[in-house]
Amino acid sequence: MKNEMWIGVWMCVLLSVAACIGSTGLGYADYRPLRNFDYFALAFSWVFLIVTLVKDRHGSKS
């Protein structure tokens, strides 16, 4: 994987953790369950990252 791909993976992980901490509060704030928008944003970013990784893997084989 190229350096740009690793940056994308770490950004997805960081944003996922930030969304979960921001929603649940981890005990320091009132609990608020994840909303539908949170689920959509997290799923969309991870699906797009997976698609990009698969395309990159197929492109590097040729």
Image: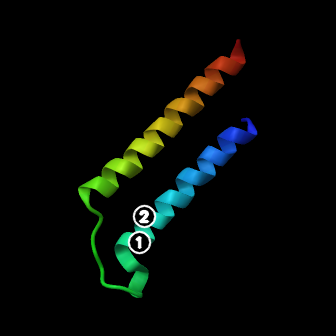
Q: Amino acid at mark 1?
A: Gly
Q: Which label sits on residue 19?
A: 2
Image point (59%, 32%), residue name = 53
Mark 1 touches mark 2? (CB < 8 Å): yes
The residue lying at 62 percent from left, 20 percent from top is: 58
Name the residue rendered at 47%, 36% in the picture. Answer: 48
Check the image and report above or below for 8 versus 2: below
Residue that mark 1 sits on? 22
Q: Position of residue 44 (x, y in %)?
A: 39, 42
For the C terminus, the image quarter is: top right
Which residue is located at x 50 percent, y 31 percent?
51
User: What residue occupies the far bottom of the structure in this picture?
Assistant: 28
Tell me if residue 3 comes above or below residue 30 in the rendering. above
Most distant residue in the top direction: 62
Which image quadrant is residue 27 in? bottom left
Q: Tell me the SS state at disc 1.
A: helix
In this rendering, position of residue 60 left or right of residue 55 = right
Looking at the image, the residue that sits furthest to the right is 3
Mark 2 is surrounded, within 10 Å at the Cα level, by few (under 14), some (14 to 19) or many (20 or more) other residues, namely: some
Structural distance between the alpha carbons of marks 1 and 2: 5 Å
